[in-house]
Image: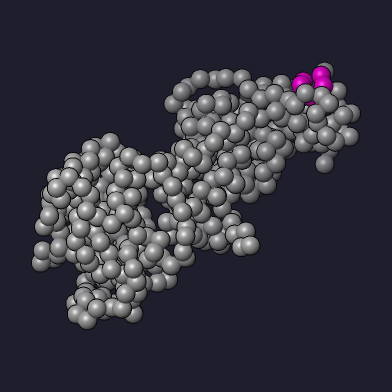
């Protein structure tokens, strides 16, 4: 059986016009692209459109991608741009549509300790934060992006991610502390 | 990591189900980017059908490519052989025929006997890496290139022709009528018209390099 191709190999093939390789890349990154767009647009339909447009644009821009570098930050930057454009054009301010997995389905011991009410309170507090605070915390803790990936998605430097995260955590603490 | 960060990490968000992006994205990539281009291509195909008496007298591979670009056939992308020529519907590999016009700026090519959508036969030259496709055939693109290249591509005039970047296809006029060529290898293609012949240099290379290659064809 043939070994699975690495991401670098798939990107190299896709750059040469291999649609099959690109389909594999889209499949592998659909979740993170959609959820990143979801975090920004706060709407599933807008997020789907943004992610789809981003993958099409990424395909057309593959010639400008520097082979050997990680593909995910490069892709997420395009996804985030598309999502921001959509959010700007729709002009709607919506509440974050995210929900929590109901109690009992979450796996870890720590999660079990957090009462459902507390978790809902935390998510609601997160949704109330101003955009840049909510986005940096969403990228870092909900999507579990690295600092470099978060920087690419938000269009800022890695150092800015660090300082913005600290500031956003302080504001979140203020929201949840009685 | 403090308690708040721990609590954030433990939030188990019930994300909406991720839609099937792959199918939608691949369909859009394979489809021509502009309706106007699609209509033009449909006209070209209709002319081709009439010219050959109601049937598509082209190779199955070429016909498949034509239909895919017109959005008339569900898109199926297969990678059957690693050899670039076979995967690009360039036809069977052949020994380089004596007298073939080749660019002096490049080394020894792989040659393929290609049947174009209008039924004419040409020799396609493939170099690499990076892979570069060179074709010379009797055609001209000027009458309609501006309108048919597609919205997803940028068209730049260069001496004697056009430099196209972005997803593209291009219609051209051949001795047997109007027809068109889909993108084969890369988002970058140089089209040069010289002495009634169309020179195509396609590959992930700079415009300057493409011009140098086209200029070196003897």
Residue A136, given in percent of the width and then of the height, sits at 65, 36
* Quarter of image, res A109: top right
A103 left or right of B120 in image: right
The answer to whether B115 is drawn above or below residue B34 in the figure is below
Question: Which residue occupies 75% across, 31% down?
Answer: B12
Front residue of A111 and B178:
B178
Query: From the image, which quarter does the C terminus of chain A lie in?
Result: top right
Which residue appears at 52% of the width and 38% of the height? B21
**Lateral position of residue A51 relative to residue B42, left or right:** right
Q: Nearer the viewer, residue B208 or B55?
A: B55
Quarter in which the N terminus of chain A is drawn: bottom right
Q: Can residue B118 be seen in this view?
A: yes
Depth check: A5 or A140 in front?
A5
Q: Is residue A89 above or below residue B218?
A: above
Q: What stretch is highlighted in magenta?
A: A116-122
Q: Is residue B124 left or right of residue B197?
A: right
Residue depicted at 10% across the width and 67% down the height = B195
Q: Which residue is drawn at 40% across and 72% down?
A: B128
Q: In this view, does B125 lie above or below B54?
A: below
Quarter location, residue B183:
bottom left
For the image, the number of numbered tags is: 0
Whether the magenta-drawn stretch holds residue A134 is answered as no
* In front of the other: A165 or B111: B111
């Amino acid at each position: 059986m043939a070994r699975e191709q690495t991401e670098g190999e798939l990107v190299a093939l896709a750059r040469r016009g291999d649609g099959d390789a690109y389909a594999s890349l889209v499949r592998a990154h659909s979740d993170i692209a959609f959820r990143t767009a979801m975090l920004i647009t706060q709407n599933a339909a807008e997020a789907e459109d943004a992610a789809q447009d981003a993958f099409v644009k990424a395909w057309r821009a593959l010639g400008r991608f520097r082979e050997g570098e990680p593909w995910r930050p490069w892709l997420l930057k395009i996804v985030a741009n598309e999502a921001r454009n959509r959010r700007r054009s729709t002009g709607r301010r919506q509440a974050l549509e995210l929900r929590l997995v109901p109690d009992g389905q979450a796996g870890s011991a720590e999660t079990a300790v957090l009462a459902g009410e507390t978790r809902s309170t935390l998510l609601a507090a997160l949704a109330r934060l101003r955009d840049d605070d909510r986005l940096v915390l969403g990228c870092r803790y909900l999507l579990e992006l690295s600092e470099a990936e978060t920087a690419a998605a938000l269009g800022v430097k890695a150092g800015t991610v660090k300082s913005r995260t600290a500031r956003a955590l302080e504001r979140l603490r203020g929201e949840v502390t009685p | 990591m403090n308690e708040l960060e721990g609590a954030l990490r433990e939030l188990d968000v019930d994300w909406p189900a991720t839609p099937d992006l792959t199918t939608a994205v691949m369909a859009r990539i394979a489809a021509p980017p502009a309706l106007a281009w699609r209509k033009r291509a449909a006209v070209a195909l209709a002319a081709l059908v009439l010219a050959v008496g109601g049937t598509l007298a082209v190779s199955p591979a070429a016909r498949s490519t034509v239909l895919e670009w017109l959005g008339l056939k569900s898109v199926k992308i297969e990678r059957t052989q690693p050899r670039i020529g076979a995967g690009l519907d360039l036809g069977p590999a052949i020994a380089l025929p004596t007298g073939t016009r080749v660019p002096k700026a490049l080394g020894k090519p792989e040659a393929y006997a290609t049947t174009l959508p209008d039924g004419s036969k040409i020799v396609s030259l493939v170099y690499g890496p990076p892979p570069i496709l060179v074709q010379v055939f009797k055609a001209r693109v000027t009458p309609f290139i501006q309108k048919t290249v597609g919205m997803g591509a940028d068209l730049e005039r260069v001496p004697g022709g056009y430099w196209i970047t972005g997803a593209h296809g291009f219609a051209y006029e051949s001795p047997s009528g109007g027809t068109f060529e889909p993108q084969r290898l890369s988002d970058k293609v140089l089209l040069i018209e010289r002495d009634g012949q169309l020179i195509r240099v396609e590959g992930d290379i700079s415009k300057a390099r493409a011009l140098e290659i086209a200029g070196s064809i003897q």
